[in-house]
Amino acid sequence: MKKSEQAYKRMMTSLLHDVKTPLTSLVGHLEAIQNKMVAGEEKDEYISVALDKAHHLKDFVESLFEWVKPDARANIPV
């Protein structure tokens, strides 16, 4: 039981890291735009990076749901 719990915690830590890293970058880019720290072409680049990070997160979350979905169905009481 203890090994299973440790494996679960390692997996959750890894998944949370995979979400937190692009989310932190996304927030930073959007805050820089909002606070008018960038303008012109640089602003366009920041928007492009933010959009890329948002799509990455969306794809990751969709993949995670697809991965978890079979387990969720198996645990639904009949």
Image (cartoon, rainbow, N blue to C red):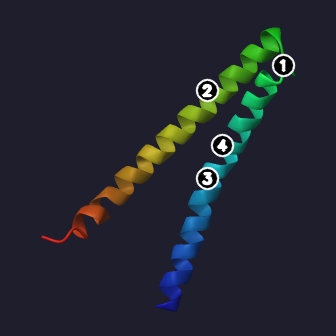
Q: Earlier in the sequence, mark 1 or mark 3?
A: 3
Q: Farthest bottom residue?
A: 1
Q: Are there few (<14), some (14-19), or many (20+) residues within 10 Å of tag 1?
A: few
Q: Nearer the viewer, residue 43 or 10?
A: 43
Give the SS element for disc 4.
helix
Q: Amino acid at mark 2?
A: Leu
Question: Which residue is located at x 35 percent, y 51 percent?
Answer: 66
Q: Earlier in the sequence, mark 2 or mark 4?
A: 4
To which residue does mark 3 refer?
A: 18
The quadrant in which the C terminus is found is: bottom left
Q: Amino acid at mark 1?
A: Lys
Q: Are marks 1 and 3 in contact (CB under 8 Å)?
A: no
Q: Locate residue 20, reporting x and y percent.
A: 66, 51
Give the SS element for disc 3.
helix
Question: Which residue is located at x 77 percent, y 23 percent?
Answer: 34
To which residue does mark 2 refer?
A: 51
Whole-angstrom CA distance, mark 4 to mark 3, is 9 Å
Q: Locate residue 77, reporting x and y percent.
A: 18, 71
Q: Locate residue 19, reporting x and y percent.
A: 60, 50
Q: Nearer the viewer, mark 1 or mark 4?
A: 1
Residue 23 marker: 4
Q: Nearer the viewer, mark 1 or mark 3?
A: 1
